[in-house]
Amino acid sequence: MDRLRELVGRYSAVAVLERGSTRALVLERGARLLALSVGGVNPLWVNPALEKVLETGGWNTGGLRLWISPERSFYYEKPERFEGWFCPASLDPGAFKLVHAEPARAVLEGVVEAVDRSTGWRLHARVRREFRLVAENRLLVRDVAVADYAGDFNLWALAQVEPGVHGTVIVPTKRGVQPVHYFGPIPHDRLAVRDDHVAFKIDGARVCKLGVRPEDLPLEGCAAIAYVAEVGGRWALLLMRTCDAPREQGECLDVAKADPAGPKGCVQSYNSGPESGPERFGEIELHFKPAVEVGGRKVAYAEYELAFAAGSREEVLERLKRETGLREVALF
């Protein structure tokens, strides 16, 4: 953590939050939670080429970031054909300032902009992010965006994770869940559907993306997604949870590339692969309720928490079961 702080400190203001033995590194550039030190393990992926990314102004530093959705509208040069994916620098890293820092809390404020390539409309939003270590193993995030924009959008949280040994994403669901295959059919050896959850393999070896519909969540508007893996000889858990999730298909804005007219997910997970470039990582993602109109502007708000742990396989799986209420979980 100290070496990472020294490196990023040469390019950006940083804040280190501490509670007990846990430390969290918040980066002003891009308003990122870049790292968590939990029992000597960081469950978040940090780009091995981090300094090069910082030097060149790239977006992919790693960690937990905030984007806007739908992806098709803002991240593709030719959205009608899902061609020419890119990340606008005005959206990420955007322009943020660390406006408040104390031992267990940091607040960042800034501006993000993006063009909706489907309509030509421009989105301009003022954004506020708050990170708070509320316990030694729990971090609360609050995001709000006030935007000038004629269309619909929602906030989108993405945590990049290290594709360690036995890397598995777990999404608690109702019985009869119908997973959404965002980029095309996910092979059977990478996806397991159980009565109360879906499991998805993270190994950085093949590009796949999983979605879970709001209709398949156990409790309306409440979503959770967890990642467990063996990293550096220890097991780690990272779980994201919110009750600001979409409640039905009409509140989901991010369409699937494989079937844009088909069902949409509000919980998603991405596995990278050689075809996507040299970086190898996974992602656990939450989409939130769409922005609402207030006084002629669009306002989007999301509150969610991260729960995390490190230890033996038994300790981490027991913590996962306590957090999710699952009795058994499928692991890859």
Image (cartoon, rainbow, N blue to C red):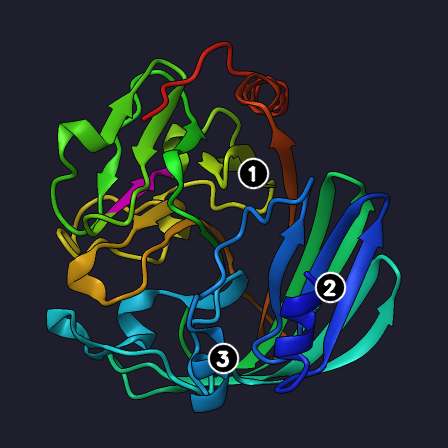
Badge 1 is on which residue? 239
In space, the residues marked 2 and 3 are separated at their CA atoms by 25 Å
Q: Which residue is mark 3?
A: 51
Regarding mark 2 in the picture, which secondary structure is present there?
strand
Left or right: 183 as drawn, with respect to 195 = left
Residue at 71% over, 65% down: 2
Q: Callout 2: few (<14), some (14-19), or many (20+) C-alpha neighbours within 10 Å?
A: some
Is there any visible trace of residue 302 in the rendered image? Answer: no
Q: Give the Cα distance between marks 1 and 2.
A: 18 Å
Q: Amino acid at mark 2?
A: Glu
Q: Amino acid at mark 3?
A: Glu
Which element type, helix, strand or loop, lies under badge 3?
A: helix
The N terminus sits in image quarter: bottom right
Look at 52% across and 45% down and name the residue there: 245
- The boundaries of the magenta stretch are 209-213
Task: Mark 1 and mark 2 in contact? Answer it, CB < 8 Å.
Answer: no
The residue sitting at 60% across, 80% down in the picture is 29
Q: Callout 1 environment at 10 Å: few (<14), some (14 to 19), or many (20+)? A: many
Q: In this figure, which residue is indicated by the disc labeled 2?
A: 130
Q: Characterize the local packing of mark 3: few (<14), some (14-19) or many (20 or more) Cα atoms within 10 angstroms.
A: some
Q: Nearer the viewer, mark 1 or mark 2?
A: 1
Q: Nearer the viewer, mark 2 or mark 3?
A: 3
Q: Position of residue 159 (x, y in %)?
A: 49, 54
Point out residue 225 in the picture as x, y percentages from the top left corner: 48, 37
